[in-house]
Image (tube, rainbow, N blue to C red):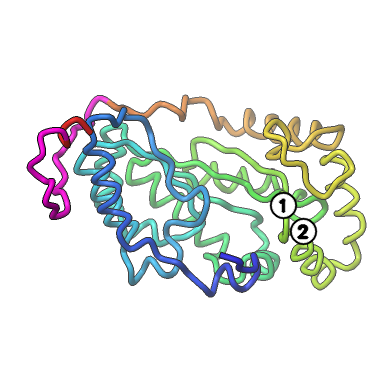
Amino acid sequence: MGLSPGLDFESRIYAKVNAPELLARELSKKSYVPEPIALGVNTDAWQPAERDLRLTRRVIEVLSERGQPFAAITKSSLIERDLDLLAPMAARGQFMAAITITTLDADMARTLEPRAATPLRRLRTIRTLSEAGIPVGVSIAPVIPFVTEPDMERVLEACAEAGASNASYIVLRLPWEVAPLFKDWLAAHFPDRADRVMSRVRDMRGGKDYDSSFANRMKGEGLWADLLKQRFHKAVRRLGLNERDRGILDMSHFRRIESPRPASPLRDDPQLDLF
């Protein structure tokens, strides 16, 4: 869209207003092979605009009606609004959630994610989902060297106490226009450690600000990346996280429901039933 990843990203919202109808149509196709769906991996499905648009809720209604399993990741407490749909799906093994928490430091979170739910509020969301019977985990992202990285064990401890059953993490990624935006933020808020942060980032990215290779882009590579991985797994074992298989969703309840077709002079063509 030619937009900046800065203020444009959060102030110019493109709503896919027909997403629920398109989803229903796709799930009705005879060619559709049921498999789990991930919601919220590109942009938050419960962002502020969802309060009014309710597109995510309508999508969940389609998924629930058809018994289509899905997983979702968010940093918004608005997910609690849809517990009436999500909890029954979780009881049938059709839903699991992850809440992104970057740090427990409220002041730091306010500068890093100024319009997102506070860390304390996200912990309450983990507890609410867990108490509703929903498998919920935490995604610690992004892990920023010397900024949010020292907080990693504390985040894991707080989330385990709140009821999280699994955890993951992603090291800071700086693709394309995000790199200069992050450097400006770093210089403004952490000038005392800006050079150290970028030096460590490049240590994990083969000397570059960003490495897009699939094997390394989430966790990085090198000595520091290995030490971070060891810290994470040691804390996870100590806290009893990731002991259950979180990747299994029950596909056995999926049912194909005929979706109304748009009016067309070819509507009665029997060949259309092949597609």
Q: Is residue 269 magenta?
A: yes
Q: Which mark is residue 81?
A: none
Magenta highlight range: 252-271
**Disc 1 residue crowd, few under 14, some 14–19, many 20+, Cα 10 Å:** few
- The residue at which mark 2 appears reads as 179
Q: Nearer the viewer, residue 167 or 28?
A: 28
Left or right of residue 208: residue 265: left
Percent position (x, y) of residue 207?
89, 43
- The residue at which mark 1 appears reads as 175
Question: Which secondary structure is most common in the magenta stretch?
Answer: loop
Give the image quarter of residue 30.
top left
Q: How far, Cα to Cα, is label 1 from label 2?
A: 6 Å
Left or right of residue 191: residue 137: left
**Which amino acid, by three-letter code, is at mark 2?**
Ala
Q: Secondary structure at mark 2?
A: helix
Percent position (x, y) of residue 52?
33, 72
**Which amino acid, by three-letter code, is at mark 1?**
Pro
Q: Nearer the viewer, residue 169 or 23?
A: 23
Q: Is residue 110 magenta?
A: no
